[in-house]
Amino acid sequence: MRLGAAVGLAVAFLIVLLDVLLFAGETVRRLPEFGTHPSIPSRLFIVVVGSVGEELFFRALVATLAAWLVYLALTPFTRNARTPARWAGILLAAGLAGMWHVGAPEHAVRVLTIGGISGVTYGWLYWWKGLEAAILAHMVVTASLYLAVPAIF
């Protein structure tokens, strides 16, 4: 479980760093300040329910279903279809989760870049360390972005 928390902190740091270096801090600027909507209890709700819900949907459902279908398709041609099938599920789920967060087309490159990094990381954790690790990492990233970053910046 500590790995999920540590990876979450690393991903949150990477998101902020890449946002500043590649996108002039646009993501950080768009985070709501404290004292504005959403309230602290709402942010905590987003951290828990959003993270659990997204991981259940995108990793446990989408990534698993995609990996299973790719595994079935590759099994007749290779002995080790498991790893490519998992990575196909990871990439599909990360892409769909990134598109889920885009909102406006003018933010697509930024959101898909940042969301892709986190989505691939959560997917890797899901397949190799378990759903709980992916959920914990997602919660740490979301808490960092909705609670810690607004307090710092």
Image (cartoon, helix red, strand yellow):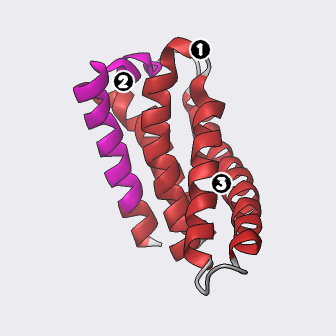
Left or right, 62 with reference to 127: right
- Circles 2, 1 touching at the beta carbon (< 8 Å): no
Q: Amino acid at mark 1?
A: Ala
Q: Residue 102's quadrant in the figure?
A: top right
Left or right: 113 in relation to 105? left
Sequence-first tag of 2 and 1: 2
Mark 3 burial class by Cα count in 10 Å: few <14, some 14-19, many 20+: many
Q: Could you say whether the residue bearing mark 2 is in a helix, strand or loop?
A: helix
Whether residue 16 is visible: yes
Residue annotated with mark 2: 28
Question: Label 3 is placed on what type of residue?
Answer: Glu
| Residue 13 pos. (x, y %) | 30, 44
Rendered view: 42 above or below 124: above
- Is the stretch drawn in magenta largely helix, strand or loop? helix
Q: Is residue 15 inside the magenta stretch?
A: yes
Any mark on residue 104, and which? Answer: 1
Is the C-beta separation of discs 2 and 3 under 8 Å?
Answer: no
Camera-side residue: 105 or 152?
105
Residue type, numbered disc 2: Val
x and y, in percent, of residue 56 in the image: 72, 56
Q: What residue is rendered at 49% in x and 39% in y?
A: 115
Judge the density around disc 1: few (<14), some (14-19), many (≥20) Cα neighbours within 10 Å: few
Label 2 and label 3: CA atoms lie apart by 23 Å
Name the residue located 51 percent from the left edge and 12 percent from the top edge. Answer: 106
- Front residue of 107/34: it is 107
Q: Which residues are magenta?
A: 7-34
| Residue corresponding to mark 3 | 55
Q: Is the residue under label 3 in contact with that under label 1 (CB below 8 Å)?
A: no
Rendering coords of residue 114 (x, y %):
43, 36
Vertical arrangement, residue 1 with respect to residue 142, above or below: below
* Residue farthest bottom in this picture: 79
